[in-house]
Structure formats: C-alpha cells, structure tokens
Image: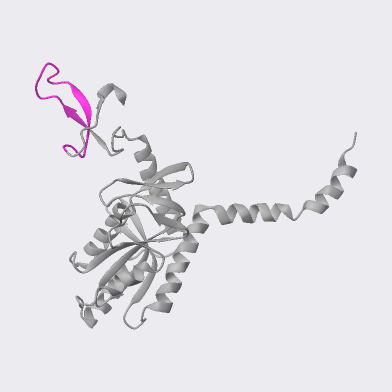
Amino acid sequence: MDFAPVLQPLIHALWYLIPLAILGGILKSPQFKGWVGESLVNLSVRLFLDKNTYHLIRNVTLPTEDGTTQIDHIIVSPYGVFVVETKNMKGWIFGSPHQRYWTQKIYKHSQKFQNPLHQNYKHVKTIQALLGLSGAQVHSVVVFVGDAAFKTEMPGNVTRGGGYLRFIKSYDEAVLAAEEVSQVLEKIDSGRLKSSFKTHREHVKHVQSIVEEKENAVRCPKCQGDMVRRVVKRGENVGKEFWGCSAFPKCRGMLNFQAE
C-alpha cells in the first residue's frame, strides 16, 4: 500500500515542528546557555560600571604550559584585574571553597560539577604570570546567572546575578596606576591568541583531553579527589602498594591497588 498520499498532507501540516525542534535543542544546549550567561555579564558591565575606569575584555584565550586556557571576562581597573568565571545554572547549588566538586540539585536529580573557584584559579595564575602582578592585584570572581540558589554559605567572590558588581566595587583602593592599567591592557591584547574558529577548536580539543583524563583517573571513594600510589611503610603489609587520597591526612580514603 502506498502511504505517500496519506502522509504528504500530514507532513505539510506539521513541517513547522522540525525547525521548532531544532531551535529547542539549541536553546537547551550548554553552549547556548553559556553564551547567554556571558552576554548578561557583558551587558551589566557596560551598563553599571564606568567604562573609563573599568575596561572589559571578553573571551580571552591564553597559551599555557600544557595547552591553552580560556577566560570568559577580564575587567581591568586601577583597583585590580578581575578574572570573571560565568556559570549559567539553575537549581540548588551546594559547595565550599575547598571541595573539588560542587553539587547541583534540581528536584530529586543531583549532579556534580567542578568547583568554579578551582577552575578560575588556573585563569588567575595565568594572568598573574602574563602580567607580572601579585595576588593582591588580581582577583577571582565567580558569577552564577540563571535560576540558581546557593544552599551553602559561599565566599564573597562567588555571587549570583549582579552581586559580582557589588563585589568588584567593594575594592576602592588603587593598586595600579593609570600607566600600569594601560600596560596591562596592551599585554593581554598582545598575549592572547587570535580569536578564530581554529583557536576555539584547538582549545575545545585540549579541554576534552583533560576531561577524558579525569574521567579515567582513579577517584577517592570518600571525597572524589585524585588518588595517588602509595606504599605501606610498616606492619604486615609493608612494601605493598595501594591507592591513597591526595588530600591525606585531611581525607583518608583508600583503595586496593588492584582497583585500577
């Protein structure tokens, strides 16, 4: 039986669902959510920070010893260089400054994600090395946009919405002279990789390799941190190898070496 005469009117009637489905997939993608979050930060900086004092640099990719690192926003001012990491997330957020992973909970579903303070730490250190600045001159800022709520106490540099603007404005003591601000802007411009599809593709490839390496790593059963090979130094098992948590003695998670 030829179904074409039957299906054709149905296809013509429902053709608009195809682009809607594609659009829905795009809107739900992490890439789009990330773009929206960064755009909100860009807009709020331009609206609420004096552009003559605070200089915004977006999407900076810098070379590192092991590849590249990509920074969402850098805000340069006499009061320091603010390195901003953006997270567009919803649900309840649980975490503390020293935890390797934080938790996002939406109803009964929970998932872990990398502590954004740890993620931004590499960005800050890369900027310090590039610019030759001290820790007092470079500040880490994490801003959550979207419908997220903190369910544990967060440090002052982890904010929601426009809270990061208040954090930045809380620094009112100049640590960079006007000439130094200009030098910082020039160094970042000359040190960054050219913004291109190739640069982005190579950075994504680098990040994917790091993610794969972490996924294949042995994790501590207690804190989910990295495990390192250790050797029993005394007792009946002296000389025997085992996996011990890298955070020892704070965490005493252990696994038999055969668990690899």
Q: Is residue 119 above or below residue 81?
A: above
Answer above or below: position of 254 versus 74. Answer: above
Quadrant that contains the C terminus:
top left
Instruction: Give the camera-side residue of 226 and 92.
Output: 92
Which of the colour schemes (rainbow, by chain, secondary structure, one colour) is used?
Answer: one colour
Name the one closer to the observer, 110 or 224.
110
| Residue 199 in view here | yes
Is 230 in the magenta? yes
Q: Main structural element of the magenta stretch: helix, strand or loop? A: loop
* Residue closest to the far top: 236
The answer to which quarter of the image holds residue 168 is bottom left
Residue 240 image offset from top left, x and y in percent: 17, 21
Residue 98 point in image, percent of width and height: 25, 49
The residue depicted at 18 percent of the width and 39 percent of the height is 250
Looking at this view, name the residue that lies furthest to the left: 234
**Could you say where residue 80 lies in the image, as x and y percent from the top left?**
24, 72
Q: Quadrant of the N terminus?
A: top right
Q: Position of residue 202 (x, y in %)?
A: 42, 53
Residue at (37% x, 71% y) in the render? 57
Q: Which residues are magenta?
A: 229-249
Does residue 224 lie above or below 175 as drawn?
above
- Residue 197 showing in the rendered view: no
Q: Is residue 12 left or right of residue 215?
A: right
Of 138 and 253, the residue lying toward us? 253
Asked whether 171 falls inside the magenta stretch, the response is no
Q: Residue at x 25, y 78 (%)?
A: 78
